[in-house]
Amino acid sequence: MKHRMENGKLKKITTTDRPSGWMDLPAYKQENRAWMKRSADISLRVLDVLDEKKMTQTELAQLMNVSRQYVSRILRGSENLTLETISKLEDVLDVTLINIVEEEPTATVNVEQKT
């Protein structure tokens, strides 16, 4: 009798109506390569700053008023960061993570030569 119950539980756990989607992961990574690279760069910078400041993920989460799990996702580089989140990180850590360079508008003049 016990054997039948275990088989029933195992079948219930292992069968599902929907596919797991694990085969879609490479395509997802390919399509989102640009923001994932930038997110990873930011996460490495944040990890360096946390180390310099001897700050924990929990302390960072408290200062940002977010969960520790969210900070963990940021630090894994797997979170598509919003400008709001980046701004909070910059304020709390007192660093610049993204630098926007403003350029003077340049005027171009096209001169046609008469021949």
Image (cartoon, rainbow, N blue to C red):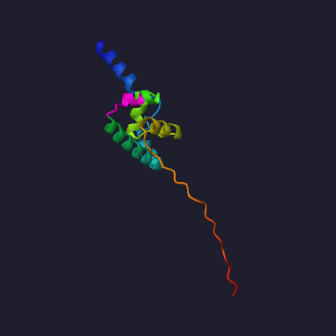
Picture quadrant where residue 55 is located? top left
Question: In what quadrant of the picture does the N terminus appear?
Answer: top left
Residue 17 locus on image (x, y percent): 47, 29
Name the residue located 56 percent from the left edge and 58 percent from the top edge: 103
Residue 54, compared with residue 111, is above or below; it is: above
Position of residue 111 in the picture relative to residue 86 (left or right): right
Q: Nearer the viewer, residue 104 or 22?
A: 104
Q: Nearer the viewer, residue 32 or 91?
A: 91
Residue 92 locus on image (x, y percent): 44, 34
Name the residue located 43 percent from the left edge and 31 percent from the top edge: 70
Q: Magenta segment: does it hold 8?
A: no
Position of residue 30 in the picture relative to residue 51 (left or right): right
Region in magenta: 54-61
Name the residue located 41 percent from the left edge and 33 percent from the top edge: 71
Name the residue located 38 percent from the left edge and 28 percent from the top edge: 59
Residue that sits furthest to the bottom in the current view = 115
Picture quadrant where residue 25 is located? top left
